[in-house]
Image (tube, rainbow, N blue to C red):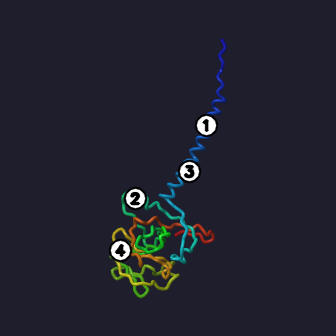
Amino acid sequence: MKFLKRDTTAQTDTQKGWKSISSTALLIISAPILALFLTAHVFQSYEVDGLSMETTLQNGDRLIVNKLPKTISNISGSEYMPNRWDIVVFDRPTSSAISGRVGHLIKRVIALPGERVTVRDGIVTIYNQENPEGFNPDANQEYSESFNVTEGQVDITVGSGEIFVLGDNRSNSTDSRRFGSINTNIVVGTAELRFTPINNMRTF
């Protein structure tokens, strides 16, 4: 009696073909989902619009903003707090009186919760437990080489969960001198890298 051997070559090739198509389709579907997840929760590109952070940042610079610490804080239920001198991107405060077309602002963190901030005679002074006599946060900082004075009259104590922010271009910046301290729940993240223009790429 003769037994016919089943030819599985065509079936195997078909299975491989379907597997390849399925893998490609899965990649096509998952790639944009992954990109959206990363943009929403890990990092995002932003373009600087305006002059308030000159000369540190120029109008048109493109930045990578790190959102991961804020995301981790949201997941863990802990308070998110950037560091002094971080450059942060945040939602436009409703009290800022800035044009409604501006969705986000970018400034530098100058004071933290519980600290008293004064601006007098062109100088910023911060008072806290470690410095009861006060200190100038701009002293010996690279960014402060671009200005001589900080205009305005301010005397404010930063509230819990808040930060006091200023633009590096002190004569052309709408910041906490105008709208007060901001709550960190409106902070998007911190600027980590300027990637364009390429010849001026740097980290922060």
Question: Mark 2 or mark 3: which comes first in sequence?
Answer: 3
Name the side, left or right, on which 197 lies relative to 86: right
Task: Compare residues 4 and 27 and report the one nearer the observer.
Answer: 27
Decide: few, some or many residues near mark 2? Use Cα within 10 Å; few <14, some 14-19, many ≥20. Answer: few
Residue position marked by numbered label 2 in the rendering: 74
CB contact under 8 Å: marks 1 and 3: no
Residue position marked by numbered label 3 in the rendering: 31
What amino acid is found at the position of numbered circle 2 in the picture? Asn
What amino acid is found at the position of numbered circle 4 in the picture? Val
Give the Cα separation between the discs numbered 1 and 3: 20 Å
Task: Compare residues 175 and 131 and report the one nearer the observer.
Answer: 175
As drawn, the label of residue 158 is 4
* Secondary structure category for the residue under label 1: helix
* Secondary structure category for the residue under label 2: helix
Instruction: Where is residue 143? Give x, y as percent.
Output: 51, 78
Instruction: Where is residue 149? Give x, y as percent.
Output: 47, 85
Give the Cα separation between the discs numbered 4 and 2: 22 Å
Residue for point 46% across, 74% down: 98
Question: Mark 1 or mark 2: which comes first in sequence?
Answer: 1
Question: Mark 1 or mark 4: which comes first in sequence?
Answer: 1
Question: Mark 4 or mark 2: which comes first in sequence?
Answer: 2
